[in-house]
Amino acid sequence: MSAIGTGGIADSRVQDICRAIGWIGLGLVAVTVSLSDLLAAAPADATGIGPLLSPPSTAFQLGTDILGRDMLSETLHGLTATVRTALPASIIALSFGALAGFSAARMPAPLAFGLRWLADIFAALPTLLLAVLIVGLTARSWLGVAAGLAATPYGFVHAFDRARRDAYAAHAEYARATGLSRTALLRRDLVYEFRAVLSASAARALASVTIILSTLSFFGFGAEPPQRDLGLMIAASRPYFLHAWWTAAYPALALMTFILFARLAAGLEESEPP
Amino acid sequence: MNAPRRILEIRDLSVARGGKAALDSFSLALDAGETVLLLGEADSGKDELLEVLCRAGESGYAAGGTIAFGDGTAMPAGRRTVPPLRIAYLGNPFLAPLNPYASTVSQLARIVAQKQVAPASTGREELRAALDRFAAAPSLASLARKPRELRAAQLAWALLACALAQRPDLLIADQSFAGLDPTASQALAEALAEEQKHEGFALIYAAQGLLTAARLRGRTIVMRRGKVVEEGDFEKLAAGQCHAYTRTLFQALPCLSPPSARGAARAEPVLQVQGLVVQSRNRRDARDGITFELRRSASLALVGEEGSGRHALVQAMIGLSPLRSGRVALDQVDISLLSPRMASRLRRRIAFIAGAEEALDPRMTLWDVVDEPLRAHLRLPRAVVAGHRENALKRVGLFSHEGRTRVGALCAFDKRRLQVARAIVSAPILVIIDEPLRGLDAMAQTIMLELLVELRKQEGPAFLIVTADFRVARALADDVMVLKDRKLVERGSAAQILRAPKDAETRRLLSAAGPGWLYLPSFRAPQPDAAAVPGAPAETTFLPFQAGKML
Amino acid sequence: MLRFIAYEGGRLVLGLVGAAFLAAAVASAGHLRDGVFPFFVAWGERIGAFAALRFGDCAISGSPILTELSNRLPVTGELVVQGAVAALLIGVPVGFAFAFDGARRVAALLVRLFSAVPTFCLALALSYLATNQLHWHAQHDAEGWLYAPRFLLQPGGALLPVLTIGLAGAAAIQAALRRVAENIAEAPWRNQMRRMGLSRWEIEWNLCLPLFLGALLAHLGELAVALLSATAVAEWVFSLPGAADLFVKSIALQDWSAAGAVLFVFAGLTLAAAFAGRCTAQPLTSPFSLS
């Protein structure tokens, strides 16, 4: 189903508002990330700034962790590390996922369905385990690539099916009957389908890869100290978060807020999986 | 003699939809055995009236006025009531009346059982009995399939049987036979009229086109934008003794008088077909090859019902399906000698105007549909493209529409006109027209025919018309080829065939094109027609062949 | 229908063959550093070994991989099944409640909010609530926690992991239901059948419900993937000795044979679920009948 909704005017207004909130939110995150060094009171992984495991207070708004690190600064730096890894990962997911699926649908049938078969096999694997496999086969520094590639099969399959359906729809047959070339039909799909859904696909990919790479870091396959992203921060808080909830809660909140903005930016279309 | 039983009395019914008045002060008194025809365009208020009658207060519309069913007291229209008589609804098979994922018989039997307050098995038996009354109706066993697996005519018969199995006091038909092949539409209308005479139910028929209304006849209410324009006998209204709007509406009445003789223009040939044999599904039958030539500014109609081979013939002619044998030349170029790429380039000179909903890409905008042939094929500058687009949209009456409107949001009539606009800008040498009036109301049908005649006059392409309806062939074609079972059964000029059809299939299709009383000398309706050649003989009165005897 | 089943069966077989090749490639990953040709030789040998059900030994326990899998798969299986039940119990009512009209858009927003929570955050949040609000007894071990509430006799304290998996699966279930609801809500046949005399309840129960069921079944493969992913997280967070836990540890220890075997099992489960789901959904959701 294309991005063209069939709901009423109120429906599309709600959609537009949600998307606007999502993109504005992502914009704010981008600004925060780029100014993180200015906004953070302490540099990344600076220990002994304050008392150990101090709850939120006026001095340390988000509290401190087991090593006396300022949670606010650490959360900002962690968010920066996460976003900086998620962005290229989402480009990989988009390129090898939606873009590749869209292109593959127009290839000769044997090649197209061969690629679809390959994508089906990878899509049958739990995304998280696929990401763990790729990191294991490569290196931790390939975390972003692993997250991006792991999110690819699903996007490929959906984009392929949609593009295949559009390419052989009845209106395409009528167009071919009147001499419209393949290039012109491709242009139609690029303009109406792909351009319309590109921003939604990009935002969706961003949300997916962020979840994957934060989970990878939580498992211990991601960033290594001293570089700490949000997943690693949450994993590090496991021994004591039951009584020092702020050490896990604020990084988790920052992570969920970023993912939520990405999901909202993707829109509220039911036809696409969340 | 007893007065007929009062079935329905509506007083000052008003319906608001989305804050606007969709129906204003509508009143109607209907007795048993009586027929009322509702005529009007899409926004005339017919749909709102049917919704209120069928849902009896549950529709959710804001409704004023009163409705009395049978002997019951008049109740406010907006109040939920259970009418003290049986009301059956008969929908249109093309408007998705049933769940496409469940079997047809289970749904219809459930409806019959529900209405009769009986078990499902009783509903099935009643449905079977109703189907058995009609020779043309499908069997109960064949209705185990899902609605999309049935042909439109089969589904229409099943819906009719379902409505009649409910033994209604009032039957509400919502453009039930619109879009069907004329012969199927004729048989269904005759069956409905016969059943009404026999069972004595009242009938309200909301008509899209005029053909079924002409067959049923009866009291006619013409509506426009929620108001009643006038009310009267169908024949009187059709004869022209009516309001100007009604007169315009009735221009869509079928006219089968032979067209004016047109000059035998000797323009260059656009389509030359020699010994073409159409691929058949079973490939067992021998086929005679079809040979003809279509010149620029000429027009040819391929008339035949579903399964006659007309679409397969067109596909083979324009190179979209392989030729079993024979030769086809498009613009004097043998298409079998061309590569697929070159054949595609040649097809740029062809335009399609189809009655199918999916002919246009619903994602495209109005402007893009018109611009696309110019940008894709000619790569003209934007300003030039805009000029051509503006001209084309003005000619079809779509210029005032917002250019960024998606095709998916347009109504059927607008989509059809948009196809004409696209054809105008592509300056085709051949226009293939496939059931151009399908799904359009009476007014839209008249306008559509006018647009097509105008297109031919102004641009001068050849017309290849594919239709099951002789009305369309009469209005647009010089020559006619009648097809049945992928064979050519008769051919000739339109005038000759309409005057003296030879083949039984031709006569059958002609008789289905309109009831005979329309063609009595006292009855004439103005029709759009190509310009007559000066000096040609005057149009002669025509009495068609119907049911084996002349009227 | 037979043709459909044969087609889907073919897809399943091809998928399983592909998964086996992929698993064999993973199992041969250790030979990549030797070069491309040695890798392909090792790959071919592995394919033969897999065909003879020879998977080698597990680096974690030293026992044969098949034995290790047979010990761990029941844990994973139990979690997935219990999680699926929890997902249905949560997701189906929520999906139906928010399926129609105005509630759908509100639900879409709520779903976006909920689906922004990564599964491991959900697991930790549930752990926190169980310990600090419900005062469940928490046991620490070297790697994590096992939560065994005093008044529940669930072996291994499986309630929290099951709830974690269930909530993650519920998101996928109610998304599938709302997708169907969006398509059905604007279907013209609903109003037409109301006009023909069926009540709203009859239409929803007899005609719409099979479509919802069909949608769930048709997406069984996606649901299986979501549940397996959530199970992997739950096993890690709650230190449960399941197959996903084996996979993660095998990758960490570069025990490629074990990793390949687990991968094949998971892929096979998902493909089989997708096959079963599509075949059972076909009569319910295809506009064309079985004959």
Image (spheres, coloured by chain):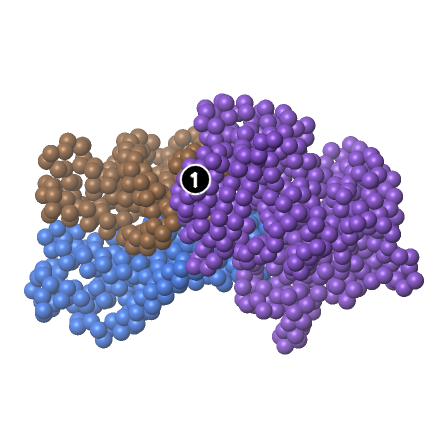
**Between B419 and A179, which is closer to the camera in this rendering?**
B419
Q: Which chain is blue?
A: A
Which color has been applied to chain C in this rendered view? Answer: brown
On the image, which quarter does residue C150 sit in?
top left
Q: Quadrant of the N terminus of chain B?
A: top right
Residue B145: x %, y % from top left: 57, 31
Is there any visible trace of residue B329 in the rendered image?
no
How many marks are shown on the rendered structure? 1
Q: Which residue is mark 1?
A: B73
Q: Quadrant of the C terminus of chain B?
A: top right
Residue B494: x %, y % from top left: 84, 50
On the image, which quarter does residue A19 sit in?
bottom left
Q: Residue furthest front?
A: B1
Identify the residue shown where x is 87% and y is 58%.
B262
Identify the residue shown where x is 29% and y is 37%.
C89
Badge 1 density bin: few <14, some 14–19, many ≥20, Cα 10 Å: few
Say above or below: B532 vs C219.
below
Is there any visible trace of residue B390 in the rendered image?
yes
Identify the residue shown where x is 42% and y is 35%.
C202
- Left or right of B287? Residue B447 is left
Q: Chain of mark 1?
A: B
Which color has been applied to chain B in this rendered view? Answer: purple
Residue B340: x %, y % from top left: 73, 54
- Left or right of B313? Residue A24 is left
**Between B43 and B460, which is closer to the camera in this rendering?**
B43
**Between B504 and B56, which is closer to the camera in this rendering?**
B56
For label 1, the SS is: loop
- Left or right of A102? Residue A267 is left
- Left or right of B79? Residue A74 is left
As shown in the figure, which amino acid type bears the numbered disc 1?
A: Thr
Residue B112: x %, y % from top left: 50, 30
